[in-house]
Amino acid sequence: MARIIIKNGYLKGGSEKAAAHLNNLVKYIATRDGVEKIKSGRELWHATKNQQALIKEILEEFPDTKELFEYEDYLAFPNRENASEFITIALEQHLDKIGDREKYLDYIANRPRVEKFDNHGLFHSGDEPLILNQIADELSAYPGNVWIPIISLRREDAAHVGYDNALAWKAILSSKALEIADNLKIHPDHLKWYAAFHNESHHPHVHMICYSTDPGEGYLTKQGIRKMKSSLANEIFRQELIPLYGEKFQRRDDLKEQAGKSLRELVGQMKSGVLQNDHMEQLITNLAERLQTVGGKKKYGYLKANVKNMVDEIVDELAKDSRVAEAYRLWWEIRGRIESIYTETPSEPLSLSQCEDFKSIRNIVIQEIMLIGSMTFEEPEDTETDLPEPENDLDMPFSGMEEDQGVTNEESSDSWWTDNYIQAKQYLYGDEDNEIPQDFEKARELFLAEAKADNPIALYDLGRMSADGLGCEADADEAYLLYEKALAVFHAAEDEKPWKYTEYRIGKMYAAGLGTEQNYLQAVDWLTLSADENYRYAQYSLGGLYYHGKGVEQDYETAFVLYTRSADQKFPYASFELGKMLRDGIGCMKNQKDSDRRFKDAFLGFVSLEERGHDDKLQYRLGWMLLNGVGTEKDKVRAREYFEKAASVGNLYASYQLAKLILSDEESQPEEVEKALGYLRKEVDTENPYAAYFLGNLYEKGRHVPQNVAEAMRLYTISAEQDNEFAAYRLGKLYLGGEGVLKDVESAVHWLTFAADRKNQYAEYALGVLYLKGEEVLKDVRKAVEYLKKSAGKENQFAQYRLGKLYLMGQEVPKNVQIALQYLNSVAEQGNQYAQYVLGKLYLIGKDIPEDKDTAIHWFTLSAAQGNIYAQFFLDHMDSIYGSRAPSIMLMGTRLLHHMSRIFSDHTPPLKPTNPRIDRKRRLKLNDKKRAAGHAQGDHEQTMSL
């Protein structure tokens, strides 16, 4: 039986609810006084015949009352007291069916045992008194639907967790108002609610009345009811749930680890020829072959339905492994214990492939199978993976770009680049200039005609269409045969007459494993032949192999040379790669000027290609460059135009970027915002980690959607489980802060460590502070300094500043002024006013380092320019400090510097000030004394929070 029960009824607008056959029940409500619970010594006697008859009638009219705590008590002990308790609550919970709104409001506000605030028991989130008659009139005239949730606890639970009084319920319902609005599909600004607490002896409960100021708004789904129960249960039973959630996370990790281990064992047995499970071997083989022909991202959410089904089959077959099955059973067991707190019927276990909590196992299957020897598939080499800081928007990677789409008929055989083939390509991509719409079926028809003449480039394009299901059903076997035939024709043409173009196409097919086994060594040989003939496409592709170390030893310098040779022939993809290498100093010296020049060349080249082909991937890339000012000036308007073009033909990355642009524009219209949110949710469904992170951030901060921390954490978890370090960092912060979520230090450390292991500087800093303070975790100074140094090495100002203080103080670590100065100088040079202030005072006082007035003034000036009033104070009094070298003058200077010691201590103000009240005149005198000693009002170092 659930620990918390929520009954969600509603009073329908525009009709009077009354039922003639329930007349006796209405009369009973109107005349009873707490169901006449008179302590006569007979309350433990067997229920009276009248009570039994009434209970029978209630159960017939309202079968759902069988789920009530009170009915459970009555069945166990069918005495008069339990019968009376059941009749009372059963009628209360169905007043929406046997009375009107005005009577319902009056009943919940004035019934016996209601805890009253004034002359009635009604309350809401505010503190102003409520006038019952006014609210009753408002409700009776309201034309829309009114929801009337009833939330009930057992007496022992209510007393144990402190929810046996109206004030506690007022606090929790006020804090959950935004979530209640979200669950009822009501805009948070439109929600109105009232409640009353009924302190029943067995099962105290709360009646709520909820409605929208917009009568046409709001509806409640089963999912909404479940979320409402879960949210309240998580808050009310917080302390009990913390260890349960910790155990759930551990069992989840155990299951994922065991699934990966079992799959690797099966793959190992399959490679060595000793696998006994023929069905699993066939499933793995089929998926491995199918993945060879799948373009784009190899993630479950990006695959077509038939490929997803293949993955699901493997996951479910894997679940039959006794170790995996036991781990899954243990996870469901703990999930059931959690759900039993807020639902009467915990979820039935699903097959492992259909359990949303274990989407990551599907991707584990894909990753492991792609590692099977020659069956692996090369990802595009031109993937952009730079990610900014977690507070900012995340850039999407460039994926699936076809760098050889710029090949023209001048660079291929005239016998291959026929009018039919050119027209087929126009139908494949659409040609606005010639008013040719995109038509996959027409393109396929023309390609087939060309294929009959053994046109290898037409055969290749047909293979791509078959693999991706464009103009036909996706068919991996047919795609492979078409690729195989195209490769054979290319070989035949090369045998007849060696040519750089055919060498390039053959090399690309070996690199991707299309129509043949993937073979990087062969790919390097063929591409080298073509590149040596100065073919720019081959130079670019070969550069990618050297950059990633595929088929050759990784060699950034050679990659840089090949990219340069290709870019110098106006190939924009190579120019883009050069821009990145010059920017980051990979394979060359950093050179921002040359980087900017190469990015500009790339941008202009992409514009030219897009004008000829209108390819959605190019449109996405151009939008990204305009949005970020790479190779061109930032232009959000033009970026949005390109994203809209690409999104209109289903480019998911463009949809994501378009959604970000719309949601970051304060002038976006509501319909645009809804469209953008739709894009993001669709992206989340395809397991896009960036979209999940971005949407989670919106829910966490309540931007464009009602604030919902639980939903934010769900989305962050989806993103983090796909290796998004920033989502893991946000999860760690939320678990650590405990704001809107159960504080769980163990989970916080887990996710922060997860992010730190992926070199996230913010997570490294957060862990450093945790281990240094030793308040939430066991203090470990060595580990703290290790994490802080990692973060400081990534130019994290907070980490550098804290390390500087540590080494300067010499309390937690051996004192080392030189190291301290290195860190403080580094952060000060980044413009941190607090480090500048500290350095100014160090050089002014001349302790541990030589006194240096000019350097002190330099740092004070920089700090004061940013509004630091303490730095300004010392600048204003510099003459009095240095006016004399007499000891008394120096003593005065020392007194002026009295507050210096405070700079080395953190001062975190309490959430609620607890300063004692003092007399106003006394306060003024104290302030005068502080100013005389060199203090300014509120003198303390600003806290640098996580």
Image (spheres, rainbow, N blue to C red):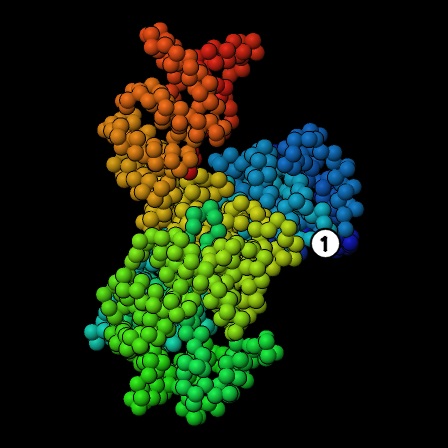
Q: Quadrant of residue 306?
A: bottom left
- Amino acid type, label 1: Gly
- Res. 179 in view: no
| Spot occupied by residue 135 in the image (x, y as percentages of width and height) | 74, 39
Q: Quadrant of residue 887?
A: top left
- 675 or 685, nearer to the observer: 675
| Spot occupied by residue 826 in the image (x, y as percentages of width and height) | 34, 36
- Res. 642 in view: yes
- 82 or 290, nearer to the observer: 290
Disc 1 residue crowd, few under 14, some 14–19, many 20+, Cα 10 Å: few
| Spot occupied by residue 638 in the image (x, y as percentages of width and height) | 57, 60
Residue shown at the point (45%, 85%) measured from the top left = 417
Residue shown at the point (27%, 40%) measured from the top left = 786
Residue shown at the point (40%, 37%) measured from the top left = 830
Q: Report the side of 872 relative to 545 (left or right).
A: right
| Residue on which the image places disc 1 | 216
Residue shown at the point (23%, 71%) measured from the top left = 269
Q: Which quarter of the figure is the C terminus placed in?
A: top left
| Spot occupied by residue 929 in the image (x, y as percentages of width and height) | 47, 10
Q: Is residue 688 above or below residue 743?
A: below
Q: Is residue 451 above or below residue 125?
A: below
Residue located farthest toward the bottom when viewing the structure as drawn = 453
Q: Is residue 738 above or below residue 99?
A: above
- 209 or 659, nearer to the observer: 659
- 68 or 414, nearer to the observer: 414
Q: Report the side of 119 relative to 339 (left or right).
A: right
